[in-house]
Image: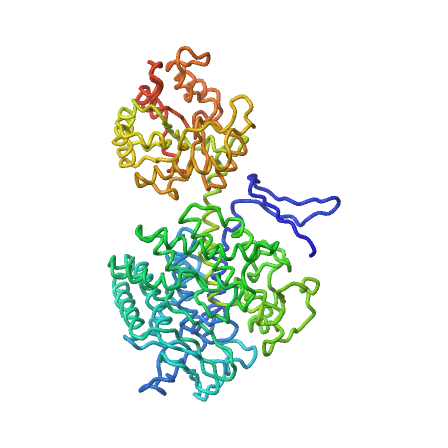
Amino acid sequence: MKSAYRLDFSKYQKSGYYIIKIGNTFSQIFKINADTYKGTAEFILKYMRQQRCGFNPYLNDSCHLHDGIIVDHPTRSGKKIEVTGGWHDATDYLQYTTTSANALYQLMFAYTKHPEIYNDKFLENGLPGVNGVPDIQDEIKWGLNWLLKMNPTYGEMYNQIADDRDHIGFRLPTTDTADYGLGEYRPVYFVTGKPQGLAKYKNNTTGVSSTAGKFASAFALAASIFKNSDSELSEILEKKAIEAYKFGLKNPGFTQTASNVSPYFYEEENFVDDMELAASQLSILTGKRKYRNNAVKWGRQETVTPWMEKGEARHYQYYPFINLGHYNLANESEKSKSEFQDYYRQGLSYLLEKGKSDPFLNGVPFIWCSNNLVVAALTQARLYAELTGSIEFLEMEAALRDWLLGCNPWGTAMICGLPGVKDSPMKPHSSLTVHLGETTYGGLVDGPVYKTIFQNQIGVNLTGNDDYAPFQNGKAIYHDDIGDYTSNEPTMDGTASLSFYLASMEHEGQKQSINNRDIKDDFGVIVRKNPNEKNIYLAFTADSFFEGGKYIIKTLKKYNIKASFFFTGNFLRNKKFKINIKKIIQDGHYVGAHSDQHLLYCDWSKRDSTLISYKEFKKDIENNYFELNRFGIERKNAKIFMPPYEWYNQQTVDWCIQQGLKVVNFTPGTGTNADYTTPEMVNYKSSSELKEGMVTYEHTDENGLNGVILLIHPGTNPARKDKFYLELENIIEDYKNKGYQFKSLKQNL
């Protein structure tokens, strides 16, 4: 491993199977296709069903039906409480509000962002079947019902079921023999807000806010999800979310998990992120400004999740590993948007800097559960790109994603049994593997750890030969061995946290599947939409002239057609066009960038000769979007870009892609782009000639005008008296009668 090279396949647009050949050496076969991530988000739900407590569909049997007996309560210790349900935390059968509430929120977040990804193949109890509900929503309901039990009334919260007396060896949950001195019951730990532990070892709890905030955020998001389908439940959840948040305000501080026979526990030491998430979610749910103001206050107390900045942490010291409250504030609130977007950027910048010297671009510290940190970084990178349109962290995101899928020193994916990969954990630290002889399908394992962690951890013993021995000479180690619980134990919360990212990647694949039907020119620019669909895409570009604007706006409105307009900064700054620009936006047309100064990117005769620098290009684009923003058009909603003069080369197209732009151009051969020509030009085309050219194109192209991008200039030089845009109504009438529909590029890109 003395040298390494990163290969970028982003420009490979053709679906298929590929190999890398160097001399006589060949790589494994790999696939490039838009459906690469299809089914992955649902695949990890397998592990969530395996982890169910109460009725376990994977075993088709039940466990822990007698949970539990209250402990550490000032007046109710020793009393029974019904808290069966939820998910086991990992290979052990402990259950924590800390991890379960976060897992529930992550599942709900994924579902709200990409509901289209999830299907209905399982019943509410987790057995195969169809019940008319997406399977992820069934899993959400399972976790939610348990969380409600753990917070039965105001101020009565429970943080944990069982403790490390559970750690007595591998056994199935249905045959659990752990003894807590309570007969067939397990202890249920009351949230005291004070250091906790029933024996020698105590945690360092200082308050209740971390747990209360997690209850509140989960209940608030669930209230939004079930508002239409179950209004009664939604009202209950909203009330409980508000109460939990109030309780968190009363006793600020963090609640850690409790140990008994060992010094290990989840050492969470921050809580402002939990309270920020709760307040931001309540703001979204209720619309009340006080919650948004509270969220901003909390968010400013911890701008960057500490492990990202410090590059180190104790076990679960800064949990959750990503602050999704920042996303809510950046996404929902115009006032605080740029501030909280920048907090995300700062965290990602720290990781990028730490990973620069690593060939895998992995700047994550290899503490226990390092894969959970990778997932957090991926989620933050994806959300930041979504919020800003920036591709600043795209390569790091790809590297971290690939790390989980096998591009790491050990060449193994980190998701058990993941279909389509050559190697994934087959011997995870799990009772299911020991007793049933199979991997824990869908589970994300802890991930690589520093050698010192592996060497100093109590009870770690490899059970077989190390298949990855040649690759254990770096700073971190990983073993696919049942005995290594530091690197090879699947975790419930880590797995749930993958939901959004995998759903997001599958969503991107779905979009690419549509776009793969598009036709691109030699530079990768979309010049025609799906030729199998009878749509015509009207596009209008403007810089100096717009005398036909009113007529075009009126005509499009008459026929209820949405079109695409691309304006330069010069045009947007011109006060005489202001009213028409606002009308175009008001009518719902797509409005995008066309450069700021209407620059000529490359030489007309020597197209590979670029006439501007990247710095000039970037500044010009930024200025164009600045002017668009003055009309309320945000860059993230206007990424479709038509270059100035509709002229470009490979270098400038690559620059556009680096800026996160989707480059389009008119369909070559349609000819209407020549409507700018004047009689003294050798290439002059009259309006009748342009119309005839359209007819010829339709008759000679095998797909007619299907999917063509038809460019018309809404204003031309006064020397051209024959204005082609005045033919717009006739064009619409003629081709509507032939069965064509007219659409905006935004409607299908």
Residue 644 sits above or below residue 3 on the image? above
Looking at the image, residue 366 sits to the left or right of residue 593; the answer is right
**Residue 30: x and y, percent?**
62, 48
- Residue farthest toward the right in the current orientation of the protein: 24
Residue 485 sits above or below residue 111 on the image? below
- Residue farthest toward the top in the current orientation of the protein: 680
**Residue 375: x and y, percent?**
49, 59
Instruction: Say which residue appears at 52% left-offset and 34% top-offset.
Output: 524
Q: Quadrant of residue 566?
A: top left
Q: Quadrant of the N terminus?
A: bottom right
Instruction: Say which residue appears at 39% left-offset and 19% top-offset.
Output: 676
| Number of marks in picture | 0
Q: Which sits in the foreground, 233 or 166?
A: 166
Residue 185 sits above or below residue 629 on the image? below
Q: Which sits in the foreground, 661 or 416?
A: 661
**Residue 277: x and y, percent?**
35, 62
Q: Quadrant of residue 238?
A: bottom left
